[in-house]
Amino acid sequence: MEDRAKLIAEGKTSIGIEFGSTRIKAVLIDGMANPLASGAFDWENSYKNGIWTYSLEEVKTGLQTAFAKLKADVEKKYGVKLTTAGALGISGMMHGYLAFDKDGNQLAEFRTWRNTITAEAAEKLTALFDFNIPQRWSISHLYQAMLNGEAHVKDIDAIYTLAAYVHYRLTGKRVIGIGEASGMFPIDSTINNYDKTMLEKFASLTKDYPWDINAILPEVLAAGDEAGVLTGEGALLLDPTGEFKAGIPLCPPEGDAGTGMVATNSVAERTGNISAGTSIFLMVVLEKALSKLYTEIDMVTTPSGRPVAMVHCNNCSGEIDAWAGIFTSICKEMGADVTIYNVLDKMFELSLKADKDCGGLVGFNYLSGEVITGLDSGKPLFFRGPDSKFNLPNFCRTQLYSAAATLGIGKEILDAENVKIDKLLGHGGYFKAPVAGQAVMAAALDAPVSVMKTAGEGGPWGQAILAGYMLNKKEGEALEDYLDSRVFGNQESFEVAPTEEDKAGFAKFIENYKKGLAAEKAAAEA
C-alpha cells in the first residue's frame, strides 16, 4: 500500500475515463495496468423530440462526479490525495453527432449512436462511397441534417463524438483517436487518416455551405501519439476543487469499441472481442479486406489503425434486465431480501438447465431498431406455441439467446467471407455470471469464447492502458506487443468452447427466430 501511495503521489499512474451508455467511470492504474482505484456516475439517455440524447450539463456533472469519487477512493485506500498522474485518456460511446459554431455554442441536441433517424443519408452515402455507412455514424447525422434542411448546418465550425468533445474541453485540441474516427468517417488504413477520395466526394455535396468537411472533422491520431495536455481550464472542469494539476499529457480520445479491443487484448490480426452490455458488438481484426460491401458490417479500425470488421447490434441486455426487475419486484412483494443482481445470477444459472433449443420459446429484445434484421424501430416481444415447453429455465435461456441472436445472424456474413478467428474474448455485463453467457455466445458464433479476470474492468481500464502506452512504450513498440508484454502476460482466462449440442439448439432457436421476425416487424410498424 505504501508503494502504491508513492506511485500515486509521484504521478506514475494513468487515468482512463469512459462515457458509457449507462455509466461514466474513471479508473486509475499503475505502470503494469493494475487497477488502483475507481469512481463512477450512473446516467441514462433521454428521448426528446424523437432523439435519443444526453445534455451537456449531464456530461459535465457526470465527469466531475466520477472523478471526485475516484479521488475519494484513492484517499480512502492509500491516504494520499490524487493531484496528478502520468497520463490521462477520455473514451466514450462511439459515433453520434455533436455540432458547434465558431463561438463554441452547441447547435443541435447531441444525437447518440442509438438513433435510427438517418436511413436516407446512410443509404445515399453508402452508394456514393461504395462503402457501408451505418446510420449511427457522425457523417450520416451530418448529411441527414443537410437533407432535412436544418438551419444549424450552415453555422457549423466543428463536429465531435462525445469523447472527442470532452477531450477538446480538457485540452483545447480538436483531435480524435483513429478507432473513434473510423466511426465518424471512413478511414484509409494505409495512411491512418480519413479516406481522401471519400472526403472529395462528400465535399461535392457541400458546395452551398461555408465550411469544408476537412476543417470541421477532428484531426486523426493513432495510439501512442500525444494529443495535448490538460489546460488550467480543463483541470478545473475535471476537478472544480483545484487540487488536480494542469499540464498532464492526454492520449487520443477513443471509442468504446477501441477500448474494448484493448481491454481484451484483441488488437492483433485474427483476434476478436464481443462487447455485451446495453448494446452488443463483435469486432474481428482482419487479415485482408472483405470482398465486397455489406450494409450489415461496419469497417472500423483498431486504435493503431488496423482494419476491423464490426457487427453491431443496438439491443442486448436491456430486456434481460427488465425481466430481472420484474422478478425482483415479485420476490420483494413476498418478503424476500434479494437484489436485481441476485436475480440476474439466478437467471443465467437456470439457463444452463434449459432445453438447448429453449423448448420452442422465442423472444425479441428489440427496445430500438436493428439494421441487420431490417427494423428501424423495435418492440420487445415474447411468444410461444401451444406445444412449447414453457418453464423458467427455458424462459431464461430464451432471454440469453435473444440477446445474442442478431449478432449471430450478422456473423453469418463473416463466415461466408471465410474470416478466420483464432480467439474471441468477451467482456461486459453479459459475461459476469460464470459459464452461461460464454456458452450461449460460443454456440451463437461457433467459436471458443474466453473471459479474462480483468474483463469486468472494461472500457475505462482499456483507455487507461492506452494512456499508459503513450507514456511508457519503448521506441517502435507496437500496441499489440505492449499489451502482450506489459499488460496480459500473466493474465488468467477461462475459455468455453461450443458444443455440438449447444450449436444445434441455437440453430433451431434461430430458425424459429427468423420465422418470428414477421411478427416483430408487424409489432414495430403497428
Image (cartoon, rainbow, N blue to C red):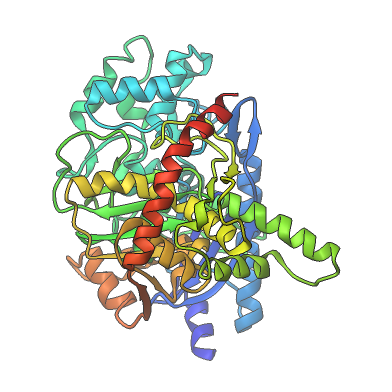
Q: Residue 89: x, y in percent?
A: 44, 58
At 56% from the left edge and 24% from the top edge, which residue is drawn? 525
Q: Residue 324: x, y in percent?
A: 66, 58
Looking at this view, is 26 or 509 the one in front?
509
Q: Quadrant of residue 330?
A: bottom right
In the displayed structure, would residue 374 be above or below residue 3? Answer: above
At 56% from the left edge and 71% from the top edge, which residue is drawn? 349
Left or right: where does residue 55 sit relative to residue 326?
left
In the displayed structure, would residue 404 be above or below residue 70? Answer: above
Q: How many marks?
A: 0
At 70% from the left edge and 56% from the top edge, which residue is drawn? 325
Q: Quadrant of residue 487?
A: bottom left
Looking at this view, is 478 or 7 the one in front?
478
Could you tell me which quadrant the N terminus lies in? bottom right
Q: Quadrant of residue 143?
A: top left
Left or right: where does residue 289 sit relative to residue 5?
left
Looking at this view, is 190 or 375 the one in front?
375
Q: Could one spot residue 252 in this view of the protein?
A: no
In the displayed structure, would residue 289 be above or below residue 490? Answer: above
At 46% from the left edge and 56% from the top edge, which residue is drawn? 276
Q: Residue 214: x, y in percent?
A: 30, 28
Q: Residue furthest bottom?
A: 2
Could you tell me which quadrant the C terminus lies in? top right
Q: Could one spot residue 186 in this view of the protein?
A: yes
Q: Residue 64: x, y in percent?
A: 63, 55
